[in-house]
Image (cartoon, grey):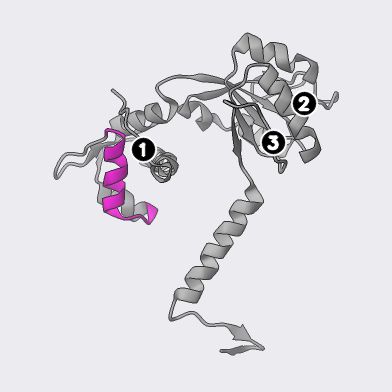
Amino acid sequence: MLPQHHVSNCTLQRLPLYVSFLRSLPEDARNISSTEIAKSLGLNPVQVRKDLAAVGSKGRPRVGYDIHWLTGHLTAYLSGGEEYSAVLVGLGNLGRALTAHSSLADYGFAVKAVFDSNQALVGSWFAGHQVQGMHKLVPVCQQLQATVGIITVPKEQAQPVCDLLVTGGVRIVWNFSTAHLTAPQGIIVQDEDIAASLALATRQMLSQQQASPHSATIQGGVSA
């Protein structure tokens, strides 16, 4: 039974990290402690235990967590125990990478159809999908009862694509373009700004360097 109480966004953001780590362990690994998970991921063991307990996962003293069970439980929690159909629009480099990213299905989001406006691509096959033209986007979304629409098109094309996805019945728009999208109330738009994420990571690194008593600034070949 999945927990019904509120789980913080910070905890939710860490859950996929735990899943990825668990899936990276050797196949013959059976149990793992919160301390081992925390050490491998650079987290606090208390925080790991709180995160896992928040979604109904409890380890056994001196035994830890059953790896297979915990992996399945976390993925089921993240997907709500359901599988949702996803469609992807824009088969450029990023779109191809996401289409071929098999672990999306592990979280309940399976890419069922791909679309592109480039007629040179329409009709071709990639990762088991035949690329379809944009005129089919709405009817295919309706036919598949697609829940998720993944946008990997240039900025100027993103809003029209979003509008078509909403018309097709999509409820979650996963936006990898740099456009600020507007959608009707009730539609979830999740923006993924790669440049912003990189800038944030850089600022965190610089802050750590400034806070470290051993950091040094090199100016003109001399440590200051």
Question: Looking at the picture, which amino acid does disc 2 mark?
Answer: Asp
Q: Relative to 6, is 137 above or below?
A: above
Name the element at disc 3.
loop
- Which residues lie in the magenta part? 41-56
Sooner in the amino-acid sequence: mark 2 or mark 1? 1
In the displayed structure, does residue 182 sit left or right of residue 48?
right
Residue under label 3, please give it: 181
Question: Is residue 130 shown to the viewer in this render?
Answer: yes
- Mark 3–mark 2 Cα distance, whole angstroms, equals 19 Å
Query: In the displayed image of the protein, which residue is found farthest to the top?
Result: 143
**Residue 46 among those drawn in magenta:** yes
Name the element at disc 2.
loop
- Mark 2–mark 1 Cα distance, whole angstroms, equals 37 Å
Query: In the displayed image of the protein, which residue is found farthest to the right?
Result: 119
Structural crowding at the residue carrying mark 3, measured as other residues with C-alpha within 10 Å and reported as few (<14), some (14–19) or many (≥20): some
**Residue 49 among those drawn in magenta:** yes
Name the element at disc 1.
loop
**Marker disc for residue 116:** 2
Identified at 32% across, 27% down, the residue is: 4
Residue under label 1, please give it: 7
Sooner in the amino-acid sequence: mark 3 or mark 1? 1
- Mark 3–mark 1 Cα distance, whole angstroms, equals 27 Å
Identified at 57% across, 20% down, the residue is: 147
Sooner in the amino-acid sequence: mark 3 or mark 2? 2
